[in-house]
């Protein structure tokens, strides 16, 4: 996995829409709670969204998944393991990224690639955002997984062995002006669980 602290703005309308809604709902908090998220305001992106829940062993499973997101894998994703979607060599690193999003309450946006059963490549964008809960063991993650260009075979040939490219972290110093952009890595950042975390609020 390649980590990049600067990066361009989010590319897909679904990731931007969900991020902007999440950012609005959190207000002055580091993240909103699960109950703060309503489907209506993000209805255009709902088909690409999902919610992950962490079990007692620390593994994440799909609690909810949109129809277009399920079509990528040609099955209902509720209850499925998030980690098993990834190529075997990617799974440990992705587990660490997921744990960091949950534990640090800092989101991420990433470029993803995968192939279907016939070997056709597909480029996607993934967004992961924390949702607060008084009991940390019951925390949730709000996510988006969306193809940059929907393939003609969507829903007929499942994706497999997801691979992660560039990751951009959305920490406490994320700046939002129209489309979100990120504060560049500088000397006042500290590295925790693979994330560059900044003290202070949003500009």
Image (tube, grey):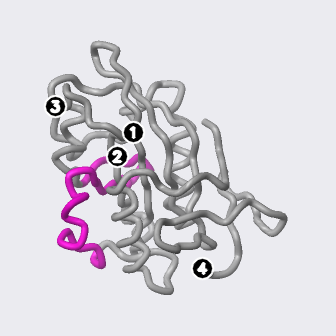
Could you give the CA–CA distance between mark 3 and mark 2, rounded to whole angstroms? 14 Å
Q: How many numbered discs sit on the rendered protein?
A: 4
- Residue identified by numbered label 1: 124
- Residue identified by numbered label 2: 145
- Residue identified by numbered label 4: 202
Could you give the CA–CA distance between mark 3 and mark 1, rounded to whole angstroms? 15 Å
Sequence-first disc among 1 and 2: 1
Which mark, residue 155? Answer: 3
Q: Position of residue 169 (x, y in %)?
A: 58, 57
Sequence-first disc among 4 and 3: 3
Residue at x-position 73% and y-position 58%: 191
The residue sitting at the right extreme is 187
The part of the chain drawn in magenta is 35-63
The answer to whether residue 157 is visible is: yes
| Badge 4 density bin: few <14, some 14–19, many ≥20, Cα 10 Å | some
Q: Mark 1 near mark 2, Cβ–Cβ under 8 Å? A: yes
Sequence-first disc among 3 and 1: 1
Could you give the CA–CA distance between mark 1 and mark 4, rounded to whole angstroms? 28 Å
Number of the front mark, 1 or 2? 1
Could you give the CA–CA distance between mark 4 and mark 2, rounded to whole angstroms? 26 Å
Specify the quadrant that holds the C terminus.
Answer: bottom right
């Amino acid at each position: 996995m390649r980590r990049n602290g600067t990066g361009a703005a989010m590319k897909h309308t679904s990731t931007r829409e969900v991020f902007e809604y999440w950012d609005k709902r959190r207000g002055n908090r580091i993240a909103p709670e699960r109950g703060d998220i309503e489907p209506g305001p993000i209805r255009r992106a709902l088909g690409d969204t999902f919610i992950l829940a962490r079990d007692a062993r620390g593994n994440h499973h799909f609690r909810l998944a949109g129809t277009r997101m399920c079509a990528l894998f040609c099955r209902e994703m509720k209850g499925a393991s998030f980690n098993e979607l990834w190529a075997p060599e990617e799974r440990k690193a992705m587990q660490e990224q997921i744990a960091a999003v949950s534990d640090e309450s800092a989101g991420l946006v990433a470029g993803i690639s995968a192939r279907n059963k016939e070997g056709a490549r597909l480029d996607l964008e993934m967004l992961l955002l924390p949702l607060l809960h008084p009991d940390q063991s019951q925390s949730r993650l709000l996510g988006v997984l969306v193809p940059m260009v929907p393939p003609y075979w969507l829903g007929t040939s499942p994706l497999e062995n997801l691979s992660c490219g560039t990751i951009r972290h959305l920490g406490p110093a994320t700046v939002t002006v129209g489309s979100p952009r990120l504060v560049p890595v500088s000397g006042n950042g500290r590295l925790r669980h693979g994330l560059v975390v900044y003290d202070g609020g949003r500009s």
